[in-house]
Image (tube, rainbow, N blue to C red):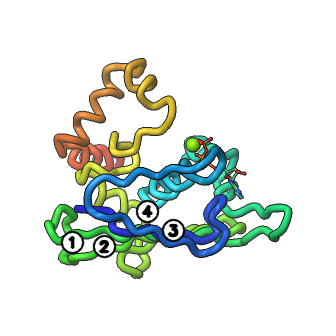
Amino acid sequence: MQLDKIEMSGFKSFADKTVIEFDKGVTAVVGPNGSGKSNLSEAIKWVLGEQSAKSLRGKKMDDIIFAGSQTRKSQNIAEVSLYINNEDKTLAVPHAEVVLTRRLNRKGESNFYINREACRLKDITNLMMDSGLGKDSFALISQGKVEKIFNDKPEDRRSIIEEAAGVLKYKDRKQQAQKK
Ligand code: ATP
Ligand code: MG
């Protein structure tokens, strides 16, 4: 599985449609302070299901929508798509390319899509949960996260290992079933 491309529009500082393609191997994103490096990683996190505005450095979720600048007016919609190469079938869907999309407008309406078909957030999190790329996985380590992992309670730290081992999905389903 490989993240091939990301498309963003209206997400944080990416007011216009911005497309970034990732080559095979390691990609380093460099740029001056405030140029959008963290915003880019947050865009990925957001599509993967991040529901906490705080962990996207906002107060409320619509803080992720482009808020305008001195020269441009604000946007009303944020949309991000991740293009994932799934030729190795890491994700349990019969598609060689999986496109995950999340959209949010200022009314607070949120939409999720897998390969352009409307779905629930849950469908995206289920799909990604055991891939090592889930929103809580250690594939995305933001500032302060390393310290948090060290200081976490052992149970919380265990969930990282459970995700890597692929058992988190089953635990989650068990919990859902017990709630019903
Ligand atoms: P550093 O090197 O300091 O970590 P960075 O490249 O990670 O910087 P980011 O934190 O990604 O930079 O980008 C911060 C910029 O994004 C700020 O200029 C901030 O005003 C802008 N920004 C954040 N949210 C929005 C928004 N909703 N609308 C417009 N701009 C935004
Ligand atoms: Mg940063």
Give the mark nearest the N terminus, 4 or 2.
Answer: 2
Residue at image location 36% in from the left, 64% down from the top? 22
Q: Is residue 50 visible?
A: no
Residue at image location 33% in from the left, 68% down from the top? 4
Query: Is the CB atom of the residue marked by disc 1 within 8 angstroms of ligand 1's nearest atom?
Result: no
Residue at image location 66% in from the left, 60% down from the top? 13
**Residue 121: numbered disc:** 4
Q: Amino acid at mark 4?
A: Leu
Give the mark nearest the N terminus, 1 or 3.
Answer: 3
Q: Which residue is mark 2?
A: 98
Q: CA distance from mark 1 to mark 4?
A: 16 Å
* 89 relative position to 11: left or right: left
Q: CA distance from mark 3 to mark 4?
A: 14 Å
Q: Nearer the observer, disc 1 or disc 3? A: 3
* 170 relative position to 80: left or right: left
Give the mark nearest the N terminus, 1 or 4.
Answer: 1
Residue 94 rendering spot, x and y as whole percentages? 18, 76
Q: Amino acid at mark 3?
A: Val
Give the mark nearest the N terminus, 2 or 1.
Answer: 1
Query: Is the CB atom of the residue marked by disc 3 within 8 angstroms of ligand 1's nearest atom?
Result: no
Q: Is residue 163 above or below residue 79?
A: above
Q: CA distance from mark 2 to mark 1?
A: 8 Å
Q: Nearer the observer, disc 1 or disc 4? A: 1
For mark 4, does the 10 Å Cα neighbourhood hold few (<14), some (14 to 19), or many (20 or more) residues?
many
Q: Which residue is mark 1?
A: 93
Task: Determine which quarter of the picture holds residue 162.
Answer: top left
**Residue 80: numbered disc:** 3
Q: Is residue 100 visible?
A: yes
Are the residues tagged 2 and 1 within 8 Å (C-beta)? yes
